[in-house]
Image: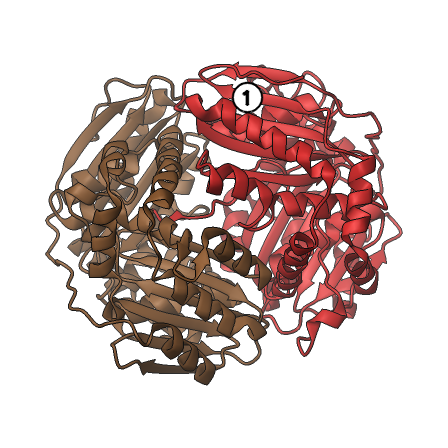
Amino acid sequence: MTKVHWIGSAPPSPLPSPPIPTRMPLCHARETPVNETIHSHIFPNGLVLVAEPMPALQSAAFTFLVPAGCAYDPTDRGGLSGFACELVLRGAGPRDSRQLVLDLDRLGVERSESIHDAHTGFGGVMLAEHLADALAIYADVLRRPHLPAEHLEAVRHVMVQEYQAVEDEPAQKVMIELRRRFYPNPWGRPCQGDLAAIHATSLDDIKSFYKRNYHAGGTILGVAGRFEWNDLVDTVGELFGDWPAGANGLADHAPCRIARDHLDYDSQQTQIGIAYPSVPYRDDRYFEAWGAVGVLSGGMSARLFTEVRERRGLCYSIYAVCHSLRHVGGVFCYAGTSAERAQETLDVTLGELTRLARGVEPSELDRLKARIKSALIMQQESSSARGTNIARDWHHLGRARSLDEVSRRIDALSCQSINGYLAANPPGDFTVVTLGPRPLEVPQ
Amino acid sequence: MKFIRETLDNGLEIVAECNPAAYSTAVGFFVQAGSRDEADAVAGVSHFLEHMAFKGTPRRTADDVNRRFDEIGAHYNACTSEESTIFYAAVLPEYQDAAVELLGDILRPSLRTEDFDTEKQVILEEIRMYEDLPPFGADDKCRAAYFGAHPLGRSVLGTIESITHLTAEAMRAYHASRYTPGNVTLVSTGRVDFDALVRAARRVCGHWEPRASRRARADAVPCRRFEVLRKPGATQQYAVELAPGPGAKLDDRYAAKLLATVLGDDTGSRLYWELVEPGLAENASLTHCEFEDAGAMMTYLCCEPDDAVENLQRIRDVYRRVRAEGVAPDEIEQAKNKVRSRIVLSSERPRGRLFVVGSDWTYRRAYCSVADDLAAVAQVTPDEIHAVLAHYPLDASATVTIGPLAEVAPPR
């Protein structure tokens, strides 16, 4: 209840956090030890284990990325991936639904599930001594779920509740609608699905989705924290080594789309979502693209915050982030403001996006590098983000980037390289979606 | 891990938990200034003032402030609640001095009228944002209903009206009365160089004039109410309930937190099994909130409008049953495991510890290491939890529900 009000708002973004370079140059680290070991192992069935030891911590965290994201939902079954994710946790192996939750609680596992475009993520963080026991429970969840018929209606209720809750969250809703219009089908689909599909989904639908998408092939397990690598490989091998391989690749080569849309919504504020094409994480120029967005929206001295909020007082919340599929990427930008100030907010924001093409200043790049430097070192204080990041790295690149490689990339970032990228790829072709009482004028 | 403290001549306190193995250092100024310290005419001034601190000082423009934070790679923020305003930054150890220097400087902001007028628009946008966001102000309304005339019933954000009418002069007077050295504690955690911390604090804050400042304290007299607010555009129905609970200075707060975990944690709790797992509610939870001279148990519900009446009754029945039948030993063990795990996980980052060390000191003038906290949780007995149940009736509550429904029958 102690509702605290922060001066800087975290972006309430429905997008998965953007892949950012997660390591920093050793030369800046001085006496701060930077951990540069990343282990990986590919089991014969295709399961990838990628792990980073963080021996100073008492915790360990894991993330399973299972190739069962909402892009795999059949056209008339939007939300099926969410059904599967809910239902695999309702009893697995020797445990019924209740015992499963009790045992995870007993181990003190803080769990999280998330549906992304390409994957369903199952994550957990806990005291390191419980890692093996927790992984054993997840081996049951992923491989031996009961998918119990008697839970189907409860899960359907959960899906409806989650769908309805988003209807009351305009800032989240506008970004969902933006994404839907920007990315080529099926990559922009919302993980919440749609109501008609949620009502029509049957147990057979879920079982066949599970069969098609839950398998070792394409599954990535990221682990970070305190563990012994050799023991971890043995544990994961015993638990998952004989999981059938399976395959279900889905290409995302199609280009992004340009759209303009307004959705009527009964609210005080108008929500503005803007997207424009960028390069994917795997692209050689990704660091330049990402650096440019950092100048736009990293820290409170960044351009959007300064020009839109600080100088003009137009809004409370504004941000821009890079997002990437495997072969297609985009920059997603959000602002929320009173209906009567929304037009000016949109104009100023689009003006800043366009102005970016004229380049960034050395002082802006220096501040960006300083922020990253400390962000990367501080990442080593917490295991939960690391496991996810290295797993996601593997999804995009087929490997986790070494510290040396990323160091070189960050060091090599210069105004010249960023400005060269911006000159060749000026922000434009904006997709704009607004949500609020009145539509806005979007300049052509 | 070492705890050290020092008091400057003007009364400003400095406390630190030094962990030489940490990668970063967190520093925060905890100011005793929150909505409970405001008068009606300046409702929302504490939070607005928090924003204004970033708008410049005699030595720095607003741009200078933001630029400097980013130059030192700080992860920084500020927040305002009913009882305090906190300005903090997490930095690499070599920037400890710079962070203290900058945070200390912005605690003496210029409060220029022109900046005040621009920032007022941002505050109004923040208020409108919360009006569009669940639970659409029901939490503030419930606090007002529950605490009645007690200062904890005041809104942190204020209202469109109070903010619109607020003047820069009134803010300057409020700042002078609350941001006194005696009301400010500098807290630091992680890899702290304590001698340097004290030197920097003396340099930046040593000349602040001491001034008497007191906070009105009173026993809260909880009010029972049931209010229905209609919001036709909402899809879901929301409810916030407040019932009595132990305050920050009472030892039974550990038992209250465990009880809240047993009854209303996100997973594996009684409300979870009763409402969330069957899909009857999107969210149903119970948390313990502590204040200086009061505490509360807060229930939150989000569900489809058609299920709201039955769900409120289900929650009430869960609370009645636990009061009659008590809590089982394995439920307590379960809750202890979860709470202990969370204590350790949230302590791994210095910026996580900062808030714990800071509130331990400002509320209780005590230092509790992670090990102390773990031991305190481990030692809670079933009898202590049952005493909390008996002493703080969960059904003696104020309830505010908001959503499309015009009428909602209160639970029996």
Query: Where does residue B57 sit, x and y in percent of width and height?
Result: 39, 58
At 45% across and 65% down in the image, what residue appears?
B102
Chain on which label 1 sits: A
Q: Who is closer to the viewer here, A347 or B294?
A: A347
Eyeballing the image, is A211 above or below A199?
below
Task: Determine whether the residue tagged by mark 1 lies in a helix, strand or loop.
Answer: strand
Q: Is residue A198 left or right of residue A81?
A: left
Q: Quadrant of residue A78?
A: top right
At 27% across and 74% down in the image, what residue appears?
B365
Question: Which chain is the one coloured brown?
Answer: B
Three-letter code for the amino acid on which mark 1 is drawn: Thr
Q: Is residue B88 left or right of residue A260?
A: left
Eyeballing the image, is B42 above or below A54?
above
Eyeballing the image, is B102 above or below B61?
below
Q: Who is closer to the viewer here, B8 or A230?
A: B8
Question: Which chain is the one coloured red?
Answer: A
> Can you identify the residue that label 1 sits on?
A434
Query: Where does residue B388 sit, x and y in percent of width and height?
Result: 22, 58
Q: Quadrant of residue A232?
A: bottom right
- Mark 1 crowdedness (10 Å alpha carbons): few <14, some 14-19, many ≥20: many
